[in-house]
Amino acid sequence: MSTATQVRSTPRGDSLLGGVAVMLVLNVVQRGVGFARGLLFCRILAEDALGLFSLSNGFLLLAAPLVVLGLPGSFGRYVEYYRERSQLRSYLVQMTVFTIVLTGFGTLVMSLFGSQLAELVLGDASAARLMKYSLASLAAVVAFNFLNELLTALRQVRAVSWMQFVNSLAFTIFGLGLVLLWESSAEAVVLAFGISCVVAMLAVLPWWSEIHAEFSADRMPLEAREFWQRLLPFAGWVWLTNLMANAADMVDRLMLIHYSHLDHQAAQALVGQYHSSRVVPLLLASLAVTIAAIVLPHLSHAWEAGRKREVSAQVNLSLKLIAVVFTVGGLLVLWGSPLLFDWLLAGKYSDGLAALPWALVGCIWFGLFAIAQNYLWCAEHARLGTLALAVGLVLNVLLNLIAIPFGLSAIMAARATATLASVILVLGFNWKFGQRLGRGLWVAMLAPLVIVTGPALGSVLLIALMVLDWRVKWLFDAEEEQQIQTVIGRGIAKLRDRFPV
């Protein structure tokens, strides 16, 4: 079969700058909705019910990519590859069929071991009813993730942002509705999560004609052997990467359930405290992951065009900007934390408040990991990202065995330390394959640590760092400053065009 490429004159989809701008606008609103929803769930639900929801939600995030072997995770890397070769249609058909089969098989197998799974995940075999609701929602979550990954890879950023916004809004409406009108339980929230995924997928129907046009003209067949030889190794490592990332997100809660030496209700309440400390930090982490997913197809396009130095520069600048901006955001959260925990949450989560600084640092570092591993994915060395996460996971477990007796703050510090180890490993691997690392990048990696010194001292330290950078260029070099000024200038020009006043 001929593999000659049919080069597109211009890439379809939204531009990088325009796409990120649209994403940021909708995500600001979406994160606001999610933030309010998280606070309301913390306020309305009992601590143990909140803990059960946190465990169920972690299970869904872990199981969704697990049952489909990470296949949709390859979209960001290979949609552009097969589109350029007029084989996108065949690629997507095969991906869809295998995703449906794997989802059905995985859900069926897990449903046969409902009680055992409830004991493992929720710490209580009698919570089999909640596990049934979780498995019922799993198929909707898998389908939502599949469509989200596909639209992101097609660079349909407006559609992705709208779908995620509708998902967040529907989850809020159905979640609060079921909790207030049906029952105040984790089952109500998990069911609402599954419903919101279905509603969000229906919300992108207006984009269907545009999406269909991406591959309707493709007629080049894709042989199954060629498909699996290229895709399976990459998808397998993406699957392991997702498994490690989601397992790392789940391991703290599981260890609190099984190693805190508390009865199941007290342990679930402690997980509720853990969840409360991560309501705001997870917004930062999820925003960074979204940015990484949007940027990946553009980096992949530059990599395929041979512009590897440009990919290195874009990854470095993204890491520095995310580190600084999110550190500012973390400090603002600390300044507002007394109002958040003492007033809005009625003082129910004092342990969560104490653990908040390290939760912020850990989530920022995880966001940086998501940005950094894009370089490895472009270089088709996803397995090394998996290795970095595996090392972080093992380190997290070992540190947790020491930290659990000292409370949530120590557990969060252990989690953040393990995440930083994963980031450092990924950067080392990136350097091996051509990414240029400099002093400014390492300064940016450590910048979030100012958060643990408190809002006042942390703000002073961050301001001092930025003043020092202005004088001696410790963080951004001259080329990066020029890029930032160019982007800001283009943004201002667009605003002036849109709003002449």
Image (cartoon, grey):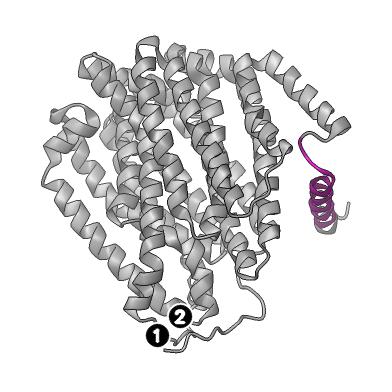
The alpha-carbon separation of the residues under discs 1 and 2 comes to 6 Å
Contact, mark 1 vs mark 2 (Cβ under 8 Å): yes
Label 2, on which residue?
87
x and y percent of residue 350 in the render?
45, 11
Which of the 4 image quarters holds residue 423? top right
Compared across the picture, whether 400 is left or right of 123 comes to: right
Q: Which residues are magenta?
A: 475-494
Residue located at (23% from left, 64% from top): 101
Q: Nearer the viewer, residue 196 or 330?
A: 330
Asked if 37 appears above or below 494 in the picture, the reply is: above
| Residue 483 counted in the magenta span | yes
- Residue 221: mark in rendering: 1
x and y percent of residue 119 in the render?
17, 31
x and y percent of residue 73 in the render?
42, 57
Q: Nearer the viewer, residue 172 or 383?
A: 383
- Quadrant in which the N terminus appears: bottom left
What is the crowding at mark 1: few (fewer than 14 residues within 10 Å), some, or many (at least 20)?
Answer: some
Q: From this viewpoint, is residue 49 visible?
A: no
- Residue 27: mark in rendering: none
x and y percent of residue 193 in the render?
35, 44
Q: Which of marks 2 and 1 precedes in the sequence?
A: 2
| Residue 286 counted in the magenta span | no
Q: Amino acid at mark 1?
A: Pro
Residue located at (58% from left, 43% from top): 427
Secondary structure of the residue carrying tag 1 is: loop
Which of the 4 image quarters holds residue 17? bottom right
Secondary structure of the residue carrying tag 2 is: loop
Compared across the picture, whether 392 is left or right of 284 comes to: left
Main secondary structure along the magenta-highlighted residues: helix
Q: Amino acid at mark 2?
A: Gln
Asked if 206 appears above or below 350 in the picture, the reply is: below
Q: Nearer the viewer, residue 199 or 77?
A: 77
